[in-house]
Image (cartoon, coloured by chain):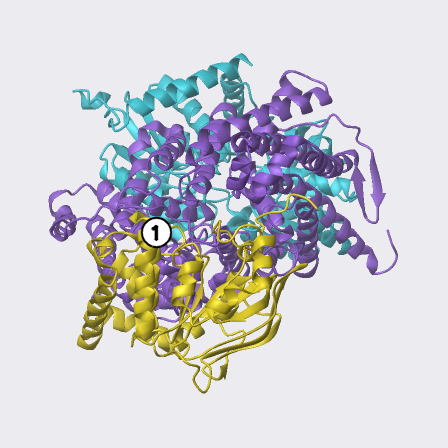
């Protein structure tokens, strides 16, 4: 399965993002077909997370374009992309700490709410407010349906998460937060799922469980773009692997072919550590230097 | 004097630079503290005031020579800064980021009140010992003190630069500023760095107080608030945490004000300053002198709110409490008690409104009194000038406050964290200043007199029972509505924005839409509250809802628990009630209030009922 | 220094004891069995803390001195006179609560205060509906006494004061082009309009008027505007601290025109804060310590003896207001309505500020206040002497 379909779901061409003197993503091109699972690997600082930020609309490229389902979405805002069916997880597990697990997942379904749909300025929000306060039967039924669905999604993660449905997310373990993130992404009914190191901080057992879950999602036909450092997981799951270094694509192909590519080995050896730390300086360049005392 | 029309403009320019020079003294210290602690230090103005009083003691009581006075003031205030850091702020290291901000407000109350008790509230003269020669420039003149102030400003910036660049501790300070955790892991004693920075900045703040006191030959215990505010504005214009930027921002602020006076008149001065601040925040959120294309220097993940397990009151208990509150006037007829509780309910409306934007959505507003003022003026003017019946004018005023409040804060929607607070503070000031200056509509400084009371069927509701019941009924209705809102999908959406706006956006949450919605609801509630106050007071002017009311509202919200509806009501009841309880303490009561606030932040930063 | 040390100790001790006594209710006044010995209580609502605390402190000095004198003279028909001073911070939400408290407290015979218009006038409906006299002795807002027939004021009426000031500036000093700086609040704004009208009637022109904010300290740029109107004199509608500041800065800016300031700058603090710069500033005051009238001399001597200070405008007003109410209560009794009626009929009550006081029962304000022309000379206020004119006739020119 997972052969390339006629039009790719996601197509990226010549994407470039510079931070001051640093070029975090450098003329990168990439396609992801319908139902495909593509992994992006590369040493720390290769620009993987920056790439995700560019695709998901949190950051805007300096050059190049992104098309989603044949439509140019370059520079479109994150909220618009979410409405188009793009969901992502974050490298460090950005859950809503004081919200319950269930509410976290329900926020994932935000774009599907009927009350959210009217986009007319002024009127739209007021209608939404009125629906929230009056809560006609249709709104209540929708909420009930979504709750049932969210509970169902959480069940996918079995005993680890289900008993904690009403617990605030800040009380969860690191691994559980990553699970909540994925559950939240699934509640969006995504057409494309971007997963940024979903197994970071997980032990081998937990990693194996996550592997099974991702495999299940893939089996359901979900298109997935994955950043991952754990190479055995990448080898088992991916239809295709893209290797990045210094913001550029240095290799691409089926997992086995890529693993033997000398350029890849050199890039990894040159950087010494493969997946040794969770830090990705692509992210760091993005995160603002908080302050300047003097210059 | 220059013969051309350029003459006055040269004078305005020089005057702007002279006053900017003074702002710079405070802005530099604030920038240093923000740089390292990411904290807008509201106590800095109070340290400045303390410096002025230490200087006054040295000059008038001990007759010390000027250099000794300088050293004493710097040492005294440096020590005070270190103590503030150690006692007031370090225990809050792991508290939510709003806690230290509030602690600095509490510290400033304690310092200002202590000074008032020790030195009496009267202003005092602080004579300068400098030579009194003046050099005429254009139509004005510059004296020795102007040069000394400029010298201290630039000199301290240069010294700081050298310290930060070339000393080991300076390196540690810069490392801490960049990444506190990483610095700690590398063996930097972050506590020591913080203490040092507070000491240096406070020493500088104290010397500023001394210099400015001499400059105006006047010091008083309340001199710090306004000065500190200007310093904060100046350093934001220059870019927070940027010492040279703070000096440039201060000079620019001075020029903006001076040209504002030149173009529009003296009473427009602060209006210009605050509008300029908003424009700069919106157009260049990192300040004019920051490098372009940088994300705001706030953490990308939401850590503004502490993890909390709120206390949930059982539904039955809430109903019982509401019923008991409604029945109270049947049992207790003491008008003073009823009036105090009535005031508490009115302020609870303000707290309810603020807890929605500051607590639920995480947009900590420091200008919320502006919404009260808009509601109060709208209702009064509708009733008096448009002949609208009071019962209709009050809800209409709510709508006006909702629309106007949202529109005014809208430019700040793109800001985050402390920047939102400063922008809303500026919006609050702008509301007051527009009320003062738009005479044809608001009657300017004269205020609105003869505002009719609320009345039903021609009977005015002015007795002790009605000033209790009317606000309580409105409060219960709004509290119920707000609880319903929080239980809907909007509740979780708004809270998601507070917890992590980046993640929320990635799930399709349009931040502007929901912030706008929250401010509109909040504006409506506060607007109705302000309108009710206006009809009870019968007279309002631009001083009826001053900036301290906004601070009080925020304290209520924090005390009750952010986003917590019951907490807002409780917070208002406690903070309106406490000063009345402390009445016996007369001039000590504000000091006690400050101490209680500090203890609360220290031991229960998530509020009495917890963050929802 | 010792004084400061004692106060610091008192501060710490006071705070500690109050914190431990938290929640303890204020001890009620003891109720002696004999009603003829019960104290007569006047309520005061005023700022003891907050940004206006300095004025509340000045009030308190005036009240305390007046109480001493009244009670030394036998009180009110043998009953001691007392003041219950409630700190309002001049915050309307607190003044309304205090008003309820006073109205409900049967011992309170009349109320004095509050300080700002916003705080005082918010409470007026409660005093009016409760039938307790609100005596706003510093409330000059033109609409203050319109709050009702229980709302009275002996504050200087600007409609009276500004023509007097205009007389001084235009008629006596001969100024023809006047620039005016006024504090932009209800008092300053009303005064500005009334002064402009009065000056015009006397043949002078107000060439510029700058309203400044209450907490302003820097006036350099405002003074450039003033300078460019080319005035031959500058009039200040200011309090003492801002008035001193403006005068300093205008002298530094090289403006040498005569300065005439409204009577509210009359305070020793004006001289202290203004230093050499205020030398030559003209002002009018209804109360002047050099006034030979015996009641003034008694007050000045007692005040200086008690506080070691010269009395200022606000402490003299407070002193005067309390003595006036004591006189009224002695004449009319302690019934609240009788106090109101007594104010309407009181004639020739001795007053430090006014000479004698008589209210216009329609406006509930004092008519015809005294006025003395002063000039700052050798670091002190002195009677202004026009060449060829006897200083005694300069007084009460209206």
Pointer 1 chain: A
Choose top left, top right, bottom left or bottom right for residue A160: bottom left
Tint applied to chain A in the drawing: yellow
Q: Is disc 1 surrounded by few (<14), some (14 to 19) or many (20+) residues within 10 Å?
A: few
Q: Which residue sits at x=40%, y=45%?
A: C119
Image vertical order of residue A195 relative to residue A131, above or below: above
- In the picture as drawn, the residue positioned furthest to the top comes out as C2
| Residue B321 appearing in the image | yes
Identify the residue at image location x=11%, y=47%. Answer: B330
Look at 33% across and 36% down and name the residue there.
B579
Q: Horizontal and vertical percent for residue C366?
A: 46, 43
Name the residue rendered at 33%, 59% in the picture: A210
Q: Nearer the viewer, residue C263 or B462?
A: B462
> How many numbered circles are shown?
1
Name the residue tied to disc 1: A204
Chain B tint in image: purple
- C340 to A137, vertically: above or below: above
- B161 relative to B524 in the view: left or right: right
Query: Residue A268 vs residue A232: left or right?
Result: right
- Camera-nearest residue between B270 and B406: B406
């Amino acid at each position: 399965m997972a052969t390339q379909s006629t039009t790719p779901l996601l197509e990226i061409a010549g994407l470039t993002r510079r931070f001051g003197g640093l070029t975090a993503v450098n003329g990168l091109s990439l396609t992801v077909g319908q139902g495909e699972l593509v992994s992006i690997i590369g040493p720390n600082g290769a620009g993987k997370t920056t790439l995700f930020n560019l695709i998901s609309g949190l950051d805007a490229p300096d050059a190049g374009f992104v098309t989603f389902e044949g439509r140019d979405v370059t520079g479109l805002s994150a909220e618009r992309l979410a409405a188009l069916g793009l969901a992502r997880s974050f490298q460090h597990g950005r859950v809503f700490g004081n919200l319950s697990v269930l509410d976290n997942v329900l926020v994932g379904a935000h774009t599907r709410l009927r009350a959210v749909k009217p986009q007319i300025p002024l009127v739209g929000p007021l209608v939404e407010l009125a629906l929230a306060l009056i809560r006609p039967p249709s709104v209540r039924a929708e909420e009930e349906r979504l709750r049932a669905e969210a509970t169902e999604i959480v069940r996918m993660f079995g005993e680890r998460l289900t008993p904690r449905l009403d617990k605030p997310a800040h009380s969860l373990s690191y691994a559980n937060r990553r699970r909540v993130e994925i559950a939240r992404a699934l509640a969006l009914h995504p057409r494309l799922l971007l997963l940024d190191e979903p197994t970071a901080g997980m032990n081998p057992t937990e990693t194996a469980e996550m592997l099974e879950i991702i495999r299940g999602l893939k089996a359901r036909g979900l298109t997935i773009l994955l950043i991952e450092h754990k190479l055995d997981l990448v080898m088992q799951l991916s239809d295709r692997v893209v290797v990045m270094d210094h913001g550029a694509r240095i290799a691409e192909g089926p997992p086995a072919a890529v693993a033997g590519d000398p350029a890849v080995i050199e890039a990894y050896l040159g950087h010494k550590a493969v997946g040794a730390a969770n830090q990705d300086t692509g992210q760091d360049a993005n995160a603002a230097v908080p302050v300047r005392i003097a210059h | 004097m220059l013969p051309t029309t350029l003459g006055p403009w040269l004078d305005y320019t020089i005057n702007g630079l002279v006053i900017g020079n003074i702002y710079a003294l405070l802005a530099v210290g604030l920038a240093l503290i923000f740089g390292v602690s990411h904290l807008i230090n509201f106590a800095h103005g109070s340290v400045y005031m303390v410096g002025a009083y230490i200087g006054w003691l040295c000059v008038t009581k001990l007759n010390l020579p000027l250099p000794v006075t300088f050293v004493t003031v710097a040492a005294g205030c440096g020590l005070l800064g270190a103590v503030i850091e150690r006692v007031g702020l370090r225990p809050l290291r792991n508290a939510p980021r709003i806690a230290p901000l509030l602690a600095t407000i509490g510290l400033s109350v304690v310092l200002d009140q202590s000074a008032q008790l020790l030195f009496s509230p009267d202003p005092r003269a602080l004579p300068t010992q400098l030579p009194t020669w003046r050099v005429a420039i254009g139509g004005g003149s510059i004296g020795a003190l102007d040069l000394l102030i400029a010298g201290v400003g630039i000199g301290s910036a240069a010294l700081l630069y050298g310290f930060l660049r070339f000393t080991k501790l300076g390196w540690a300070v810069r490392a801490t500023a960049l990444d506190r955790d990483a610095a700690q892991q590398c063996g930097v004693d972050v506590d020591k760095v913080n203490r040092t920075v507070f000491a240096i900045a406070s020493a500088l703040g104290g010397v500023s107080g001394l210099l400015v006191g001499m400059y105006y030959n006047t010091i008083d215990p309340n001199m710090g608030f306004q000065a500190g505010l200007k310093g904060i504005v100046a350093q934001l214009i220059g870019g927070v945490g940027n010492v040279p930027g703070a000096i440039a921002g201060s000079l620019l602020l001075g020029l903006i004000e001076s040209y504002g006076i030149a173009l529009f008149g003296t009473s427009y001065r602060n209006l210009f300053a605050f509008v300029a601040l908003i424009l700069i925040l919106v157009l260049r959120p990192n300040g004019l002198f920051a490098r372009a294309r940088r994300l705001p220097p706030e953490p990308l993940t939401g850590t503004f709110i502490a993890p909390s397990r709120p206390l949930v009151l059982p539904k039955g208990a809430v109903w019982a409490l509401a019923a008991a509150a409604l029945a109270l006037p049947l049992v207790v007829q003491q008008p003073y008690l009823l009036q105090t509780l009535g005031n508490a309910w009115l302020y609870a409306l303000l707290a309810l409104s603020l807890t929605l934007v500051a607590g639920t959505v995480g947009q900590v507003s420091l200008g919320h009194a502006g919404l009260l003022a808009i509601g109060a003026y709208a209702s009064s003017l509708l009733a008096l000038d448009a002949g609208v019946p009071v019962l209709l004018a009050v809800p209409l005023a709510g709508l006006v406050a909702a629309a106007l409040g949202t529109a005014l804060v809208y430019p700040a929607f793109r800001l985050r964290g402390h920047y939102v607070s400063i922008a809303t503070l500026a919006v609050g000031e702008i509301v007051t200043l527009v009320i003062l200056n738009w005479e044809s509509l608001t009657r300017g400084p004269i205020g609105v007199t003869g505002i009719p009371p609320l009345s039903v069927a021609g009977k005015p509701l002015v007795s002790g029972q009605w000033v209790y019941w009317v606000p309580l009924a409105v409060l219960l209705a709004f509290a119920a509505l707000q609880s319903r809102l929080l239980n809907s999908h909007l509740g979780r959406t708004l809270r998601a924005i507070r917890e992590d706006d980046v993640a929320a956006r990635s799930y399709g949450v349009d931040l502007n839409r929901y912030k706008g919605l929250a401010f509109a609801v909040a504006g409506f509630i506060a607007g109705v509250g302000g309108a009710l106050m206006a009809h009870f007071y019968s007279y309002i002017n631009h001083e009826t809802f001053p900036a301290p009311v906004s601070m009080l509202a925020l304290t209520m919200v924090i005390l009750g628990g952010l986003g917590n509806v019951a907490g807002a009501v409780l917070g208002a009841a406690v903070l309106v009630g406490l000063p009345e309880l402390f009445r016996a303490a007369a001039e000590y009561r504000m000091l006690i209030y400050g101490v209680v606030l500090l203890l609360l932040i220290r031991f229960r930063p998530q509020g009495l009922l917890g963050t929802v | 220094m010792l004084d400061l040390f004692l106060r610091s100790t008192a501060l710490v001790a006071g705070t500690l004891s109050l914190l431990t006594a938290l929640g303890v209710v204020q001890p009620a006044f003891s109720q002696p069995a004999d009603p003829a010995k019960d104290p007569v209580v006047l309520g005061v609502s005023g700022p003891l803390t907050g940004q206006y605390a300095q004025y509340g402190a000045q009030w308190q000095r005036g009240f305390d001195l007046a109480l001493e004198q009244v009670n030394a003279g036998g009180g009110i028909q043998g009953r001691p006179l007392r003041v219950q001073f409630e700190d309002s911070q001049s915050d309307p939400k607190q003044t309304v609560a205090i008003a309820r408290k006073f109205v409900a407290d049967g011992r309170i015979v009349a109320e004095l205060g509050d300080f700002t218009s916003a705080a005082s006038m918010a409470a007026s409906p409660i005093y009016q509906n409760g039938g307790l006299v609100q005596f706003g002795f510093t409330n000059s807002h033109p609409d203050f006494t319109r709050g009702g027939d229980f709302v009275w004021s002996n504050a200087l009426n600007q409609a009276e004061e500004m023509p007097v000031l205009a007389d001084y500036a235009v008629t006596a000093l001969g100024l023809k082009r006047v620039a005016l700086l006024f504090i932009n609040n209800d008092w300053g704004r009303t005064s500005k309009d009334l002064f402009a009208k009065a000056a015009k009637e006397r043949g002078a022109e107000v060439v510029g008027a700058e309203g400044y904010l209450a907490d302003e300290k820097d006036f350099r740029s405002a003074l450039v505007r003033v300078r460019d109107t080319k005035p031959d004199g500058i009039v200040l509608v200011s309090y003492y601290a801002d008035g001193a500041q403006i005068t300093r800065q205008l002298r530094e800016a090289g403006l040498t025109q005569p300065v005439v300031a409204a009577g509210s700058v009359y305070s020793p603090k004006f001289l202290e804060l203004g230093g050499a710069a205020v030398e030559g500033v003209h002002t009018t005051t209804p109360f002047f310590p050099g006034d030979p009238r015996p009641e003034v001399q008694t007050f000045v001597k007692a005040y200086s003896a008690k506080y070691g200070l010269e009395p200022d405008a606000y402490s003299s007003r407070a002193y005067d207001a309390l003595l006036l109410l004591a006189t009224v209560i002695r004449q009319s009794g302690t019934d609240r309505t009788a106090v109101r009626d007594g104010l309407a009929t009181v004639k020739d009550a001795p007053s430090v500020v006014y000479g004698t006081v008589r209210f216009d029962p329609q406006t509930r304000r004092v008519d015809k206040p005294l006025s003395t022309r002063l000039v700052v000379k050798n670091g002190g206020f002195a009677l202004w002497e026009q060449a060829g004119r006897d200083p005694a006739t300069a007084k009460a020119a209206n």
